Image: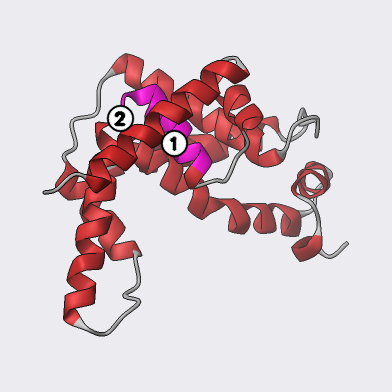
Amino acid sequence: MDARSADDGVLMLAWASGSAAAFDELYARHKGPLYRFLLRTVKDRGTADELFQETWSRVVAARARYRPEAKFTTWLLQIAHNLAIDTFRKRRPQAGAEETEAVFAAQAAPEREQPEHALSDFELRRRMQQAIESLPDEQRTAFVLRMENELSIEDIASITGVGKETAKSRLRYAMARVREQMTAQP
């Protein structure tokens, strides 16, 4: 089996059967999107780091029980979402926008060389991050799952444990609110 071309579910089953290469490929495919989801969900780098590690620990512990009934991405993000909810219940994150912006600025590669474009790109990213952070938790989660991970309404509903219409409504309100804040004059 060529791990690079295999489906995530197939890789998970191969890993449960002992293929370390299958796990390496799964991790490589999903580490970035998972970390970004957690960081945008909890808005604190330290907490995101902890939840990232715990999510992968849970994946490791559950590998023998995994069944490919849902997409691997949905299953992985549901684990992460549940851990984030548990963290919110224990304590509310206190990180500010500056720390999150610093992380995103460090991750973003400059696409243009001209300073005036870099400044406007930075301003757009900053405004987008502030708009996302201002969303209520449920709307922010739906927005990030859709925009960052390109998940369907059905997958968002499954991950967050709500009905399809509720997920659709949360996403619609989040999109409208972000659009409103992005078009508002500074």
Looking at the image, residue 3 lies above or below residue 182: below
Residue located 72% across and 35% down the image: 63
Q: Answer whether residue 138 is magenta in the image.
A: yes
Element under disc 2: loop
Say whether disc 1 or disc 2 marks the residue closer to the N-terminus.
2
Visible in this render: residue 43?
no
Residue 171 falls left or right of residue 25: left
Q: Is residue 1 magenta?
A: no
Identify the residue position indicated by label 2 in the image. Answer: 135
Could you say where residue 18 lies in the image, as x and y percent from the top left? 80, 48
Other residues around mark 1 within 10 Å, as few (<14) / some (14–19) / many (≥20): many
Q: 45 or 53: which is nearer to us?
A: 45
Q: Is 43 rendered above or below residue 185?
A: above
Q: Is 69 situated left or right of 136 in this image?
A: right
Residue flagged by tag 1: what amino acid is it? Phe
List the residue tagged with mark 1: 143
Q: Position of residue 93 (x, y in %)?
A: 24, 28
Q: Nearer the viewer, residue 94 or 153?
A: 153
Q: Residue 47, how many percent across, how many down?
A: 32, 36
Q: Quadrant of residue 144?
A: top left
Q: CA distance from mark 1 to mark 2?
A: 9 Å
Q: How is the image coloured?
A: secondary structure
Query: Taking the image as drawn, is residue 113 in sight?
Result: yes
Q: Check whether the beta carbons of the residues at disc 1 and disc 2 lie within 8 A of each other.
A: yes
Q: Quadrant of the N terminus?
A: bottom right
Image vertical order of residue 126 relative to residue 81, above or below = below
What span is in magenta?
135-146
Amino acid type at circle 2 is Leu
Q: Of helix, strand and loop, which mostly describes the magenta segment? A: helix
> Farthest residue toward the right?
1
